[in-house]
Image (tube, helix red, strand yellow):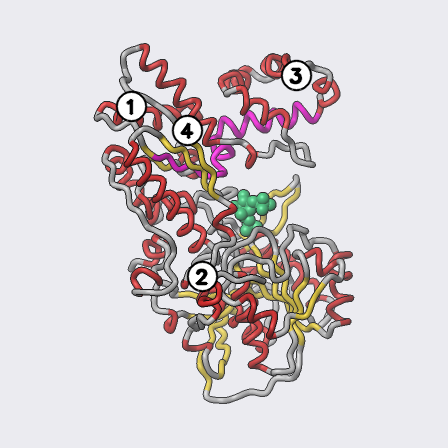
Amino acid sequence: MTKSALQIARAAYQPKLPKALKGHVKAVAGEATQSVADQEAIQKLFPNTYGMPLIKFETSSEATTFPVMNVGVILSGGQAPGGHNVISGLFDGIKKLNPANKLYGFILGPGGLVDHNYMELTADIIDEYRNTGGFDIIGSGRTKLEKVEQFEKGYEILKELGIKALVIIGGDDSNTNACVLAEYYAAKNYGVQVIGCPKTIDGDLKNDMIETSFGFDTACKTYSEVIGNIQRDCNSARKYWHFIKLMGRSASHIALECALQVQPNVCIISEEVEAKDMSLDDIVTYIAKVVADRAAKGNNFGTVLIPEGLIEFIPAMKRLIAELNDFLATNAEEFSHIKKSHQRDYIISKLSPENSAIYASLPEGVARQLTLDRDPHGNVQVSLIETEKLLSEMVATKLAAWKEEGKYVGKFAAQHHFFGYEGRCAAPSNFDADYCYSLGYAASALIANGKTGYMASVRNTTAPADEWIAGGVPITMMMNMERRNGEMKPVIQKALVKLDGAPFKAFAAQRDHWAMETDYVYPGPIQYFGPTEVCDQPTKTLQLEQAK
Ligand code: FBP
């Protein structure tokens, strides 16, 4: 691998660990736990892993000897900065338990376990990847581990390699499946522990015990750097409105964090749109009003942040998409015979009056995306909808109408951006480098203590790393029952933006000021070397949530 100068210098960085994980470690059990909801149903489904206590690690004066055991690791789902450090923390942790322990990585996600596709991760390999972004050390994948046949196929290879513990690094769905697997292996007495680690740039795997998912910090800082650069460009040329869509499949944590970092003129929060039952037209009117008000002051420029998942949070759009899904599923044959040029009118004539009117109001390209691009289950691929273009086109139309009515005097020219993939494999910030290494190390301590069905946790993360609290949380504690594909399933509750939470309140208190004034903040690139206030700040979200 040809390395950049930063990669070479960064390889020497020694991630910080919480004090309790530095020497000999003992696990202290807390109170027994309960699931966040649906206790009876979850307990029934997880008789072997329900109700376990919270675990906190503390420094011990006694050294313990551990027998040799091999460990497996899987990276699951979308990439998030810091995954390599979870693996290096896990590697260093298990080698400290017993230098003869081996770590095996399953290739390209959970599929690697089922297909027996693996590699041993030796010290030389690990050293190549310390403090780097990406998941390329073993690759990732989105295969869902949920069927008994997959669990059994997995067990075959675990047994063959002498693997006694499996660490699954993933988001809410992957950790839900990790918990189901832990329960299955426990019920079968297979002697394989399963431990989860909280990953996703989306920031939606968090709760009272998991303060943040790893990767959120670096991804948001990367997006905020480029949004800041765009804002400076836009404040220099003063001729464009930039419509910027930000990744985050469902929750708006990324958009909100970026807004707190860069102070844009507009940021839409999907959870608020849903709570206020806003229509697409309400959102367009809100943006157009900011554009018109700024134009009245001679400012024909600005920035608009849009969360990726917005469309599905607009109640009326949700209803339209549901009707389209049903209609096209039952009338696929007839629809396939309609000439392309007549398809739009055909759909308009078939939908219910409310949905038909919304569909007719959509720009041609978006209407087409809603009827053409469907996933293998026949559903609209919402992430392919270019919401940033949809909104800017509709804002332009509204402004043109207002101009005719004499309500708007100004020029409107838009640029469009989508920031997502460029943040998922960035070199981890100091926060993510330390947090991930600590999570991996905590996972090794959970393994050493014979735990299964736990997620590694590191808390008190706005304090210096030395004071972080490492431990484990029973995954069943985070679960509730939700309807998935028509069936009630146990799943980890997804954390959406809380409208009564401190980060949203801080944003809502300032957004009117940011809309009218050009009060942009330019965060600049992530810094790895230098003053601690520049290099080690956690996200604004964490700082606001943890503020006492
Ligand atoms: P995870 O939840 O698996 O971490 O992935 C999150 C994410 O990055 C979303 O923000 C985005 O919508 C999605 O993955 C994109 O998925 P893909 O990489 O399959 O295009």
Say which residue label 2 marks: 432
| Mark number, residue 292 | 1
The kind of secondary structure element at disc 3 is: helix
In the image, taking residue 264 as reference, residue 313 lies left or right, namely right
- Mark with earlier residue (4, 3): 4
Image location of residue 278, percent across then percent down: 41, 28
Residue located at (28% from left, 34% from top): 515
Magenta range is: 303-329
Q: Does the residue tagged 3 have its C-beta within 8 Å of any atom of ligand 1? A: no
Say which residue label 4 marks: 278
- Mark with earlier residue (4, 2): 4
Residues at circles 4 and 1 in contact by the CB criterion of under 8 Å:
no
The quadrant in which the C terminus is found is bottom left
The kind of secondary structure element at disc 2 is: helix
Image location of residue 188, percent across then percent down: 74, 67
Residue located at (39% from left, 21% from top): 396
Report the mark closest to the observer, 4 or 3.
Answer: 3
Image location of residue 53, percent across then percent down: 52, 69
Amino acid type shown at disc 3: Lys
